[in-house]
Image (cartoon, rainbow, N blue to C red):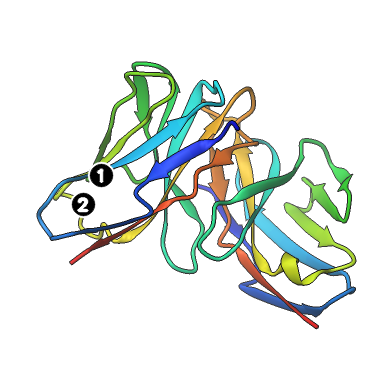
Amino acid sequence: GQSLEQPSEVTAVEGAIVQINCTYQTSGFYGLSWYQQHDGGAPTFLSYNALDGLEETGRFSSFLSRSDSYGYLLLQELQMKDSASYFCAVCMNTGFQKLVFGTGTRLLVSP
Amino acid sequence: DGGITQSPKYLFRKEGQNVTLSCEQNLNHDAMYWYRQDPGQGLRLIYYSQIVNDFQKGDIAEGYSVSREKKESFPLTVTSAQKNPTAFYLCASSKDFSYEQYFGPGTRLTVT
């Protein structure tokens, strides 16, 4: 089976940098995705790492290390609107390329 | 504007009744998915469809059924066999790569 673990909650202040970790136990996947979900809203795609290393998209960066079974999402210059839940998800390569989601991390940004 | 629509946003039903949740997309995506989200938890895959007239069970398909008669539409029926149907249901679609999915606004189903 597959499992992805994330911290349940992270707090930070505006302007700060925060890292949300994702550790996984799974065999055979194409890559690691990250999604953002505001309360009561739809998840939106943020980034995808097919290869090890860092991917940067504006204020957000995502990292993957397959040898360490670990990834993270880095959010810089935090804004109040970044308060949301963040999910990592592995894209499986066993037959259909389904996404298996982590438990989610709730980020609270304070003034 | 292209996107995914789900209706209704809130749905209330009595126990023992079947209920159908709507999902429509105009993104011209081939693949569509249904997920269930419970409070404080991640998304779990119920059913998925890669092409019209074909669909497959996901990880938690028991008590649910779907159809895919049109590319744009992928309705989900929550049957009375689903033991704990109260949840937030999300529909999604993707074009070429499953890792990038587009989600609808969701339907919050409450069964009492």
At 76% across and 72% down in the image, what residue appears?
A80
Reading the chain from its start, which is encountered first: label 1 or label 2? 1
Q: Badge 2 sits on which subunit?
A: B
Tell me where residue B24 sits by quadrant: top left
Q: Which quadrant does the N terminus of chain B fall into?
A: top right
Same subunit under labels 1 and 2? Answer: yes
Q: Which residue is mark 2?
A: B82
Q: Quadrant of residue B86?
A: bottom left
Which picture quadrant has residue B49? top left
Is the residue A90 above or below the residue B70 in the image?
below
Spot the residue most to the bottom.
Answer: A111
Residue drawn at x 34%, y 46% is B60
- Residue A83 lies, in percent from the top left, at 69, 70
In this rendering, position of residue B89 left or right of residue A34: left
Separation of marks 1 and 2 at Cα, in angstroms: 7 Å
Q: Is residue A53 above or below residue A79?
A: above
Q: Which mark is residue B62?
A: 1
Who is closer to the viewer here, A49 or B105? B105
